[in-house]
Image: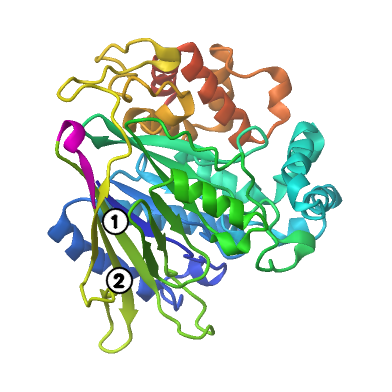
Amino acid sequence: MLLLHISDIHFREPDCLDADTDPDHPIRTRISNHLKTKVDEFGPVDAILVGGDIAYKAHPDEYAVATQWLAELANICGCSSTNRVFVVPGNHDVDRSITGKNLGLQNAQHRIANARLDNKEQALRAQLRSDQVARDLFAAHAAYNDFAAPMNCQIYPTKIFWHQDLPLGGGVMLRINGLTSTLLSGKDGADDREGDLFLSAMQTALDPVEDRVHLTLCHHPVEWLSDGDQVDDDLNSRAMFQLFGHKHRQRIVPTPHYIRVLAGSVNPSRKEPGWEPGYNLLRIDVEGVGAARQLRVETHQFRYQRSPEMFVPVQTPSRQDAHRATMPFPGRLHPAGSPAPTLAAGGAIADSSTLLADLAPAQVIDVEASMGDELRRDLIHRFWQLDGDRKREVMFSLALITEDELSLPEPERYGMAFLRAGERGQLDQLAELVATAGGN
């Protein structure tokens, strides 16, 4: 499996609206051109992982340009723009015009931030239990959520992070965990300070089951989190692959049992010292069978060179163009050589002719995780192409939303509806209705 890891794109309105005058546009073109050569060399990319700061000030126009560019990038990478792009929010995806004015949001953030470290999770849970306070806590993520919903990567009070599975091969699933480090970002409309943010153990409860490999995608590195020590310990014990952004410093931190990869910025500020755009490619392969299985990992980092203008490899300390490692496999549940049965929502064996086919190994019955399936993500994307009336009609026809939920933001309302459809085994019916309604 080949993964493209990018972060900190910083589409800035109004500059990004005119490619002819946007000074960052040529850098993105250079990345696209360089990626073409890497796809020719390595083969198509299986998934694009975007580590936050897609926008600069969380303006809807910035996300419109980002959506178009990511679709073009996916086409270059040889993967689908509808079902192979995954995103998490960064601090620039938080609308500070809202954090600076919304008193409910300010109160919620302060209650969490001012709690003692050992009480912060309790404080967060308390805010999430209050419907209106919880709505306020996510208010500044509204434009990000509108952008992320067609990729099924939106966040809301009952889903503060997301996780989806991709088949890694040999009956093994790669679980991509999209973590949200921005709940306290932009407090009072101000810049974040290192050590002030909060993740919580709720987001690092990564179940270490057999035949599942965890990858975490998070914008802020652990040192930016008030609970960074606990997050560090949890991830190092449970996540073999840890991807971060924010600092604009490309690094690989390898250990025998996990690899931490820090992204450069696609478009860092031209005023910052050491301005150096960059991107990462990560290949993960399962090798061997039975007890002899292992993971072979290859990490390539590329940085921008001013003269001559091009992207070049970031060399390892041993002057290699890529970091290569073999890692022990975390476990095995099914006997070697025996195919793992696939599941429909709720644990029923799926008919291979339906939308629910080929979802995951037998131990995976998590409906949200199964939304990583290519057909399911394609269905979600097609649904979001419908107009507002048709969305409501489709979901009401299957009783997947209630009248009371019409007051919820669409990303939350329909995110919950898709999970219900999976739990009730209604995804095939939903797919037929979406096709009839024009979501092709």
Viewer-proximal residue among 30 and 266: 266
- Residue 351 position, x and y percent, is 28, 11
Answer left or right for 337 relative to 315: left
Q: In this view, does 325 lie to the left or right of 166?
A: left
Residue type at mark 2: give it.
Phe
Q: Does the magenta stretch include residue 230?
A: no
Horizontal side of 425 relative to 387 (left or right) equals left
**Residue that protrudes farthest toward the bottom in the picture:** 307
Residue displayed at 51% across by 24% down: 418
For residue 282, the mark is 1
Image position of 34 with respect to 234: above or below: below
Residue bounds of the magenta highlight: 289-296
Residue bearing mark 2: 302
Whether residue 18 is visible:
yes
Task: Pick whichever, 176 or 195, lies toward us.
Answer: 195
Q: Do the residues labelled 2 and 1 touch (CB within 8 Å)?
A: no
